[in-house]
Image (cartoon, rainbow, N blue to C red):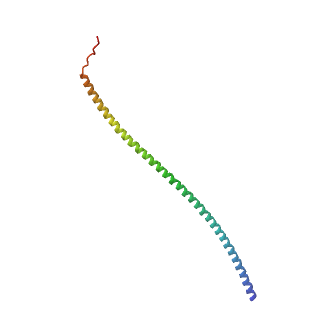
């Protein structure tokens, strides 16, 4: 009876050892799978970091281009403002010139009427 119990115990121990071996193999596979997934995650994080760095460079380039455009627009605004000032000055000068021409025309008409009052004699001829 002791021998049969020892055999049964040995058989159960062998079965348990098999189950433990099977569990260790499954655990080992799970660990390897986890390691592989961790490596892929690390690669994905590296790729994400590279993409973010590229985006940061693009955003910096866009910001630089925007600043340059703002400077260009400011220069254009300054030129347009100067052109507006010159145009207003020219309009004022045209108005002054028109007024002056009108006054000269009036004075010319007066002068013409004054000159018309004079009678000019025929020049004498030498004999």
Residue 116, given in percent of the width and then of the height, sits at 25, 22
Query: In the figure, is residue 54 to the left or right of 123?
Result: right
Q: Give the residue at x 74% y 86%.
A: 6
Residue 108, given in percent of the width and then of the height, sits at 29, 28
Judged from this view, the residue extending furthest toward the bottom is 1
In the rendered image of this protein, does residue 48 appear above or below residue 104?
A: below
Q: In the rendered image, which quarter contains the C terminus? A: top left
Please give the count of numbered marks on the rendered protein: 0
Q: Which of 29 and 59 is in front in this view?
A: 59
Is residue 100 visible to the viewer in this orientation of the structure? yes
Q: Quadrant of residue 47?
A: bottom right
Q: Give the residue at x 36% y 40%.
A: 89
Is residue 1 visible to the viewer in this orientation of the structure? no
Judged from this view, the residue extending furthest toward the top is 127
Q: Give the residue at x 51% y 51%.
A: 65
Q: In the rendered image, which quarter contains the N terminus? A: bottom right
Q: Which of 40 and 79 is in front in this view?
A: 79
Q: Nearer the viewer, residue 21 or 103?
A: 103
Q: Nearer the viewer, residue 57 or 123?
A: 123
Residue 66, given in percent of the width and then of the height, sits at 49, 52
Judged from this view, the residue extending furthest toward the front is 127
Residue 15, given in percent of the width and then of the height, sits at 71, 79
Query: In the figure, is residue 115 to the left or right of 13?
Result: left
Q: In which quarter of the image is residue 54?
A: bottom right
In the rendered image of this protein, does residue 92 appear above or below residue 36?
A: above
Q: Give the residue at x 44% y 46%.
A: 76
In the rendered image of this protein, does residue 123 appear above or below residue 56?
A: above
């Amino acid at each position: 009876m002791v021998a049969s119990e020892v055999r049964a115990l040995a058989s159960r121990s062998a079965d348990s050892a098999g189950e433990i071996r099977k569990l260790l193999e499954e655990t080992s596979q799970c660990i390897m799978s986890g390691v592989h997934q961790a490596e892929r995650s690390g690669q994905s994080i590296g790729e994400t970091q590279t993409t973010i760095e590229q985006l940061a460079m693009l955003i910096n380039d866009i910001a630089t281009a925007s600043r340059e455009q703002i400077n260009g627009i400011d220069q254009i605004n300054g030129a347009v403002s100067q052109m507006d000032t010159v145009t207003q000055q020219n309009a004022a000068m045209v108005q002054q010139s028109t007024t002056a021409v009108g006054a000269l025309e009036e004075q010319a008409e007066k002068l013409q009427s004054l000159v018309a009052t004079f009678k000019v004699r025929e020049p004498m001829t030498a004999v």
